[in-house]
Image (cartoon, rainbow, N blue to C red):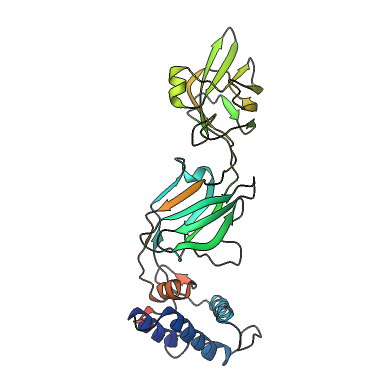
Amino acid sequence: MVTWGSAGVFGSIGKAVKEYNADSVSPSAIQSRASAFVNAYILNNYGILGRSTSQSFADQLEDMIALMVEEAQTVNGNAVTYGSEDFEGLALGDTMTGLAATQMMIDDDTITIECVTAKVGTDSWRLTSMRRGSVGRTATTGVAYPAADTEDVAGLEFTIAAPAAEVFNDGSAIVGSADTITGGVKGTNCDADGKVWCKVEESAGTYTMTVYPTEGDRTGDSNAVATVVYTAIGSATVTEAASSGLAGTITIDTLATDAGLEIKLNVPYAKGDIYTIGDTTSDDLGVFQTFFRDAIKRTLPNDLVGGETIADSLAT
């Protein structure tokens, strides 16, 4: 087995951490020195996965981390959180799943995730940190970030889900599904969030849903962009008004009236759409973890409840 503690790998790396934290050595020099430590204590003495001792520092790190996992070695992790989230005024839960902070998160940061290439189902998103700048990696709609076997560089993990319609304030459960309403254009035939504002009225057994682009238009009963007329539950046709472009169908589950119904349309993402994750925190109490995050741009297997096997005292 590899010797990890004071007489082994992290006893030596701890010396580099002390110098780095004392501002006496540059990150590039620290990487070179850490590379030598990894090489001397792991590669030369024990060998990993049959690799050559002349492999790159990045490969050395991957081998060291793989061996730490294999031998259940951990460092003290940082407590990380984010405090705010937004996507064009909607809750992130509407279109983002699995959002969580990772050990790459830094304190007092804001991270934006901006759509830079809009291709339905495979949109590309650029991640930018207020403190770090561009993190140099993109996310893709429908694909977990970071990708499998890829190190996170932003401090987040998430999946941006494909857009889907949502219904709000439908106390009578009138609408079963609105995913097949087509032609929505943010800020044109719906509001800036892709939402339309509806009211449902009934006359002699015929129900009419009138669709407006803003709440103010619904209040003033003006500028309708579509109507839906039906007499029974099931699929009903959406008919555009004022050449708005809205079309498709909507599924009606209940025959009832409603003056406050709202629908977020299934509008594809557009270039410039932005998620914002703000008010990030990291307590930076994990000395080795913080060093690797800041100087090496990598994180290590960690324990957050005091069960780490590699003591921070080796670096302090």
The answer to whether residue 258 shows anywhere in this view is yes
Residue pictured at 47% horizontal, 84% vertical: 34
Foreground of the two, 173 or 261: 261
> Which of the 4 image quarters holds residue 5?
bottom left
Residue 156 x %, y %: 48, 59
Of all residues shown, which one is farthest toward the top? 204
The answer to whether residue 1 shows anywhere in this view is no
Residue 276 x %, y %: 45, 50
The quadrant of the picture occupied by the C terminus is bottom left
In the drawing, does residue 168 fall left or right of residue 253?
left
The quadrant of the picture occupied by the N terminus is bottom right
Residue pictured at 46% horizontal, 22% vertical: 217
Residue pictured at 48% horizontal, 46% vertical: 92
In the drawing, does residue 85 fall left or right of residue 240?
left
Foreground of the two, 3 or 204: 204
Residue 155 x %, y %: 46, 62
Q: Is residue 224 above or below residue 46?
A: above
Residue 287 x %, y %: 38, 75
Q: Is residue 41 above or below residue 136?
A: below
Number of callouts: 0
